[in-house]
Image (cartoon, rainbow, N blue to C red):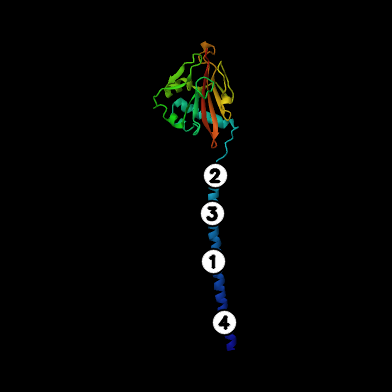
Amino acid sequence: MRRTILLLSTALVGGLVLGTLLGSGLFSAGHGLSRAASASVPMAQAQMTAASTTPVPLNTEDNDLLLARAGSVLELLKEKDYTALSGLVHPQKGVTLTPFSTVSTECDRTLTQTDVAELEENQQTYVWGVMDGSGSPIRSTCSDYFDRFVYNADYAQAPEVGVDTVLMSGNALENVSDAYPDARFVDYNFPGIDPGKNGYDWCSLKLVFEPWQNEWYLVGLIHSEWTT
């Protein structure tokens, strides 16, 4: 009888010990799973953040994106906010300025982002090409050149806008597509400003853009006008 009681007591104690160990093991496993799940949350968040910051490739065929960037450039030219405009100039190629339709790497002047940002403060006189017809050098400061051969009319209100299309031409060669084979352009055109001149005062401004790091950047400003 006493032996039977002893065996029962031993079994009871062993069961309690085993239950405690199992309970501890289950708790530890559950705790480990909880920690693993918690650790996976920051990892998932990091993956989502990385996915959300991955730049979307520029759709170079989307005319709306091109026109939106061209509109921003026009507004900054109109406001003469050259500091902001410099941020839209191609960081590596700068922007080349053409006074009379025909792009010439020998005559046209190219401005860097820094040049554009400091445009109004720079009072130095430069040669910007030659006058159509006379062939005399165009000598002026940066700001004077922009007033005469860039934003000489309110192109933000131009009645005609062409995408990759030259809307009007005179006796000067229109070579924008040859000069900028990897670019697209927007042509803002006034077929005439003074009705009494019957169109002999037409003028236009072409904004030329090239893609760089998933954005359009300004690489060319081409002014055109009627000349004798």
The mark closer to the camera, 1 or 4, is: 1
- Where is residue 143 drawn, in percent x and y? 42, 24
**To which residue does mark 1 refer?**
28
Q: Residues within 10 Å of mark 2 (few under 14, many from 20)?
A: few
Q: Secondary structure at mark 3?
A: helix
Disc 3 + disc 1, Cβ < 8 Å = no
- The residues tagged by marks 3 and 1 sit, at their Cα atoms, a distance apart of 20 Å
- The residues tagged by marks 4 and 2 sit, at their Cα atoms, a distance apart of 63 Å
Earlier residue among tags 3 and 2: 3
The mark closer to the camera, 4 or 2, is: 2
Q: Residues within 10 Å of mark 4 (few under 14, many from 20)?
A: few
**To which residue does mark 3 refer?**
41
Residue at 57% across / 78% down in the picture?
A: 14
Which quadrant of the figure has residue 19? bottom right
Toward the bottom, the furthest residue is 1
Q: The residue under label 4 is which amino acid type?
A: Thr
Residue at 57% across / 77% down in the picture?
A: 15
- Where is residue 72 drawn, in percent x and y? 50, 30
**To which residue does mark 2 refer?**
52
Disc 1 + disc 4, Cβ < 8 Å = no
